[in-house]
Each structure stands twice: as structure tokens, then as C-alpha cells.
Image (tube, grey):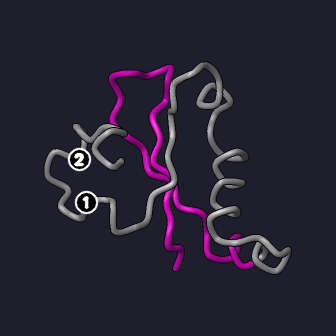
Amino acid sequence: MARYRIAWEDPAEPEAPLKITAPSDRWLMERKRDGMTEEQATMLCAQITLPQRCFEGNKTHFVIVPVEAIPTDRTNRNAWRLGDLT
């Protein structure tokens, strides 16, 4: 199972809750065979998967976090913001 997740906010929807994206285990295994670390593969997944607007401007719209950093309690999950995980 992947040890990292991509936590991101869509700049086009500033009031929307934080989104979590997980690379598939199969995809990670293929990238590891190519010589990437899991962190590098997760960053590549972010670059491929997230909307281009997440990489524009001077504000960070995503962060790579370990699975343990994501709260397991789903209470108030629609209120999570990027700053809550960093």
C-alpha cells in the first residue's frame, strides 16, 4: 500500500474542501521498476493528475503527505484545509 498521499486544493474552487489523491499501488510499482523512489513517483503522479492551475502562481496548492498525517476521523472532513496537514 502506498505510504504517501497528495493533499490538494483547487484554486478554481477556493471554498471547496481539501482533496486527497492516492497513487495506485500498481502505478507505484511500475515507477519503482523505473528507478524512482516512492516520493518521486508520488510527485510525478501529482504532476500528471492535478489540474495545471495547481502549479501556477506563487501559492502552494498541494503537498505530499504520509498516510499517517491524514486524519482518520471523518468528522468535519469538509472543513479540512491544506494548512491542517502541514
The residue indicated by pointer 2 is: 77
Establish if 25 lies above or below 83.
below
Q: Label 1: few (<14), some or many (≥20) within 10 Å?
A: few
- 73 and 67: which one is in front? 67
Element under label 1?
loop
On the image, the x and y values in percent for residue 11 come to 49, 23
Q: Residue 66 is drawn in which quadrant?
A: bottom left
For label 2, the SS is helix
Q: Position of residue 73 (x, y in %)?
A: 18, 61
| In this rendering, position of residue 30 left or right of residue 81 | right
Q: Is 45 on the left-hand or right-hand side of 34?
A: left
Specify the segment rendered in magenta.
Answer: 1-29
The residue that mark 1 highlights is 71
> Which mark is nearer the camera, 2 or 1?
1
Residue 2 drawn in magenta: yes
Asked if marks 2 and 1 touch (Cβ < 8 Å), the reply is: yes
**Badge 2, how many Cα within 10 Å: few under 14, some, many 20+?**
few
Q: Nearer the viewer, residue 44 or 73?
A: 44
Label 2 to label 1: alpha-carbon separation: 9 Å
Residue 52 lies in what quarter of the image?
top right
* Label annotation for residue 50: none
Q: Which residue corresponds to the image point at 42% horizontal and 44% vertical from the top-left?
A: 19
Query: Closer to the N terminus: mark 2 or mark 1?
Result: 1
